[in-house]
Amino acid sequence: MQYLWNTYSNALLKLDKSSQKYIQKFNGIDDKSNEFSLLKENGFIVYEHLDEFGRICFEEKQSLFTYNADTLSFIIAPGMKCNYNCSYCFESKSDLSGIMQPEVACDVADYICQRLRNNPNARRLRVTWFGGEPLLYVNIVEIISHKLIEFTKQNNIKYYASIITNGRFLNSKTLSKLQEFCVTKAQITVDGMRELYCISKGALPNDFDCVIDNICNAADKIKISVRLNIPNNVDVVKEAIDITNYLFSERGLFGKVHVYLAYVCDYSLFTRRCMESLLRFFAELFQMDRFFVRELWHF
Ligand code: SF4
């Protein structure tokens, strides 16, 4: 079996024999076939005059310098403390113990409102809660959220919020608070099955069970992306499949959460071995006929 991965659109296609033949013989002409449409739709076939690298550079600069965009996005870290100590986390290696004070939270919200006022084209505001562990600072999330929700309502601006959390404190009470703060998506990192999870995060076995219970409880209420942050010094493929099987089969989360692999390695030293291991992982996943490219792997 062969796979085709588009690193721009992140589309990943599983190629059967006839698709492989189609690609080998492809002559650049639109023959109106399903294969052509699929390849075009997923960014594998582009117009000859399109400068793909130039497009990436342009989009990057546009996102940095476009003030008139109709969507303003902010990532807010109310504090940098965390209940875990992940081996790969920059926070554990720095002195980032600062916590946002309530008056600073008000200033942050005022600043964002001012940015929206200054931009007559603003139609959407997106906020991502980040940390440290943002759920250690629910009071700060509350102050800023209430102000932003109020302002956006009054000004007919759509408000979207998401959170990046380790999920340890995402109990029912916190979850309903997040819903009150219009948080509709959570990204929760799971580093593998119980043993690896504990080693990687400096956590206790009970922490693993609690996080998975929290994911199960939250999955019906908000969108959950489970990020598999599996360190590359273990058998990534085995761990990813074990944890995915556990989540999908034993905990009944198949179709309820979006699972994706984040390959953990020092990207400045990204080696052929890392890439081979990553590709092997994809290959094995797709042999388990339970994963759908578009459903689960459009990260
Ligand atoms: S859970 Fe997140 S913030 Fe906390 S130590 Fe791990 S990577 Fe860092």
Image (tube, rainbow, N blue to C red):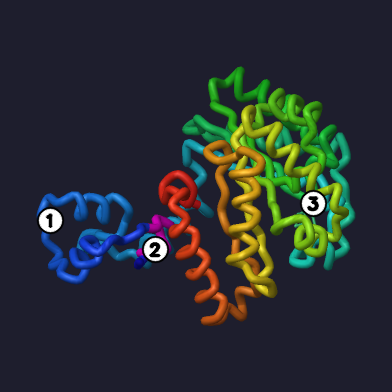
The front one of 210 and 106 is 210
Q: What residue type is labelled 1?
A: Asp
The residue indicated by pointer 2 is: 5
How far apart marks 1 and 3 lie (CA) works out to 50 Å
The front one of 15 and 179 is 15
Asked whether, in this view, residue 155 is left or right of residue 195, the answer is: left
Choose the circle earlier in sequence order: 2 or 1.
Answer: 2
- Count residues near mark 1 (Cα–Cα under 10 Å), then give few for <14, some for 14-19, many for 20+: few
As drawn, the label of residue 132 is 3
Tell me the mark number nearer the camera, choosing from 3 and 2.
Answer: 2
Q: Is residue 264 visible?
A: yes
Which of the 4 quarters of the picture holds residue 4? bottom left
Ligand 1 contact, mark 3 (Cβ < 8 Å): yes
Q: Do the residues labelled 3 and 2 touch (CB within 8 Å)?
A: no
Asked whether, in this view, residue 272 is left or right of residue 80, the answer is: left
Which of the 4 quarters of the picture holds residue 267? bottom right
Farthest residue toward the front?
A: 250
Q: Is residue 143 visible?
A: no
Q: Which amino acid does label 2 sit on?
A: Trp
| Above or below for 226 versus 238 | above
Point out the stretch of residues depicted in magenta. 3-12
Question: Most prominent secondary structure in the magenta stretch?
Answer: loop
Say which residue appears at 75% left-offset and 48% top-offset: 166
